[in-house]
Image: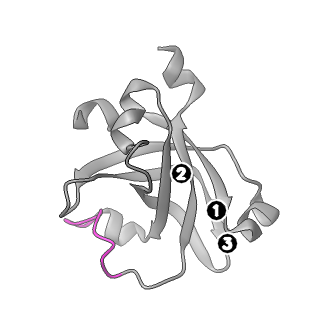
Amino acid sequence: MKKKLEGMSVAVMVSDPWEFGTAHGVGPFTAKVVKTGKDESGLLKALLRLDVPIVFEGVRYEFIVAESRAVSHPIEGLAHGSSAFCSMTAISSDQANSSKPLDVSWWRGGGALIGSVEPSASTRQK
């Protein structure tokens, strides 16, 4: 499953915060799945890299850790053409290139989005 998702082109849609949508639109924002891995509870997370970085309220959104918010729409579903309803946390390029890029246990606020991640139209056609 990991190999199938890594490198996949995806589309990110943002539903919250609404101020993000006012400033940048709700998407779709194109991205690639850079890395996947399971958290301590066994749920799959994905590190996404936006094709075009966005700066919102002083936070650079280039690398984003996406975690499923609904068991019925897991990240794994992307490999089968389904969308995933996600919490998304912006991380620095240093963290993205670290040994633990998916670890957002340090997060206490800011740099977070809620929305969906789905296979891009070009990925679904393959």
User: Residue 92: in sight, yes or no?
Assistant: yes
Colour scheme of the picture? one colour
Where residue 7 sits in the image (x, y, percent)?
Answer: 37, 36
Where residue 41 sits in the image (x, y, percent)?
Answer: 20, 61
Crowd around label 3: few <14 · some 14–19 · many ≥20 (10 Å): few
Where residue 57 sits in the image (x, y, percent)?
Answer: 67, 79
Crowd around label 1: few <14 · some 14–19 · many ≥20 (10 Å): few
For the residues labelled 2 and 1, say whether their Cβ atoms are less than 8 Å apart: yes
Seen in the picture, residue 51 relative to 100 is either above or below; the reply is: above
Question: Dot 3 corresponds to which residue?
Answer: 56
Which sits in the foreground, 119 or 40? 40
For the residues labelled 1 and 3, say whether their Cβ atoms are less than 8 Å apart: yes
Instruction: State which region is magenta.
Output: 98-106
Q: Residue furthest right?
A: 22
Q: Amino acid at mark 3?
A: Phe
How many numbered badges does the structure rendering display? Answer: 3
Question: Dot 2 corresponds to which residue?
Answer: 50
Q: Residue at x 19, y 54 (%)?
A: 42
